Image: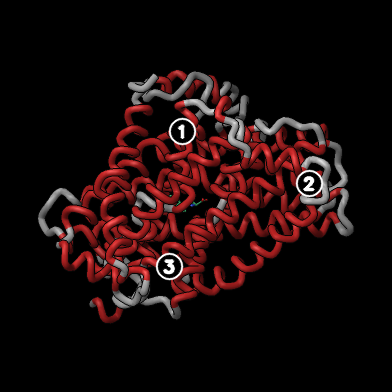
Amino acid sequence: MADTRAQWGSRIGFILAAAGSAVGLGNMWKFPYITGENGGGAFVLVYLASILLVGLPIMIGEILLGRTSQRSTVGAFRKLAPGTAWAGVGWLGVAAGIVILSYYSVVAGWAMHYVYLSLTGSIAGQSADTLNQTFGGLVTDSSLNLMWHTAFMAITIAIVIGGVQKGVERAARLLMPLLLLMMGAMLIYASTLDGFGKALDFVFGFHTEALTGAGVLEAVGHSFFTLSVGMGAMLTYGSYLKRDDDLVGSAIYISVLDTLVALMACLVLFPITFTQGMEPAAGPGLVFKNMPIAFASLLGGGLWSVVFFSLLTFAALTSSISLLEVAASYFIDERGWSRKRAVLTIAGVIFALGIPSALSNSTEIFGSDFAALTAPAFEVVGVEAGKNWFDTFDYLASNWMLPLGGLGIAAFAAWRVGGEARQQSFAAGSSLGKVKAFYLAWLTLLRYVVPIAIILVMLHALGALG
Ligand code: TRP
């Protein structure tokens, strides 16, 4: 069976597909706005440290488990540790993929709506006030949210049914370079703005005064989300690698690309924000309210706007397919379902679960205030008052499911996999991986630093750290 499993066409194809999974709304939508909310500088530094010391080691471990087992997430644990409870880590990943995609699709739907608005010319050249209203109008419009959520899920389903290897690899090969080019061009433009210096200082200045304990832990949680680690997405993609493909080098490329796009997004958005005298802590609307302002002052602004929001949609798509693939591949690999049946069933569940997220900012559903109805229930699971369904899913995934999954993956790769097999696997096909000190550093991080960081995130989520 293992012989007939699909594989990546080339190493660069794998790197781009995995980077496509990593680079998404987390980089261009979430990272800038949580950086804005956490006061910049120090938050960014903690995030970078967490990518290097927590996220990257887990990513290496995750790809290693997939490549070694040649199985997707539940199957990998079953094969490497038959008859044990470790398969639960895989299960958690399947559940996390379902939860994340359900609200991810709603935000991706916003990006699609902005493509539509750009095409009809109602975005570029609008005032900050109008853009504010446009975004506010969108998130509270239940039928628009439902429609775009449906459309985005339909496209995700079509690609994953079509066979993810060819579709994903081909799409990522084209889209990732385009995205980098576009962000590079926007960065050059942003560097000519008055607010660029202030933005540089905001993002890279060491403003410790703005950083809170909650901010530190949010940065750690986000490093999981942005790298797509902790739920077996990288494991599943790694399972389509040949056993002698360079693992360490690939993981480094993926993390660097991911971090680059996140930082570029900040260095494009914040100069615009400061030049316009706007607030960096604008919340989830940041990228939707601020980018169009930049387009207004550019030659062919309408076209820039179409291209940018299309790329944002595509970035979301190369991520959403990896989220769906994890859950679908469980039913394909372990239950023997056809790809079509697995994808349609799981996607149906995800779609339904996304409906409350699509409606969560609406105040008028079936004649009642949906947000107000759900809020009390969420306080029970430790979500702050005033947070809605959408926020709750994001919180559950980032603070609980991914860190727990990451802990399981790290523990399994660092303690359970046989030492010699582990070291050989780490070194296979990789010049960096053959450096003993490098291997030991990775193992030490995975054994000690990663679990401590994750346990802190969870204690914080429980409110034990105040
Ligand atoms: N990393 C993606 C982003 O930043 C989201 C994502 C895709 C993801 N696949 C994942 C997050 C798997 C966690 C796990 O937008």
Query: Of circles 2 and 1, which is in front?
Result: 1
- What type is the residue that disc 1 sits on? Val
Q: In terms of image quadrants, where is residue 441?
A: bottom left
Q: Could you tell me residue 299's position as x and y percent?
A: 89, 58
Residue at image point 25% right, 57% down: 74
Mark 1 residue element: helix
Residue 463: x and y in percent read 36, 22
Q: Residues under labels 3 and 2: Cα distance?
A: 35 Å
Mark sitting on residue 250: 3
Residue 280 relative to residue 244: left or right: right
The spot of residue 282 in percent (x, y) is 67, 32
- Residue 156 appears anywhere in the view: no
Residue located at (16% from left, 62% from top):
419
Q: Is residue 140 above or below residue 160?
A: above
Mark 2 — residue?
A: 292
- The quarter of the rendered structure image containing the C terminus is top left
Contact? badges 1 and 3 (CB < 8 Å): no
- At label 1, counting other C-alpha atoms closer than 10 Å, the crowd grade (few under 14, some 14-19, many 20 or more) is many
> In the image, what residue type sits under mark 3?
Ser
Residue identified by numbered label 1: 216
- Look at label 2 and name its amino acid: Pro
Cα distance, mark 1 to mark 3? Answer: 27 Å
Q: Which of the two discs, 1 and 3, labels the residue nearer the N terminus?
A: 1
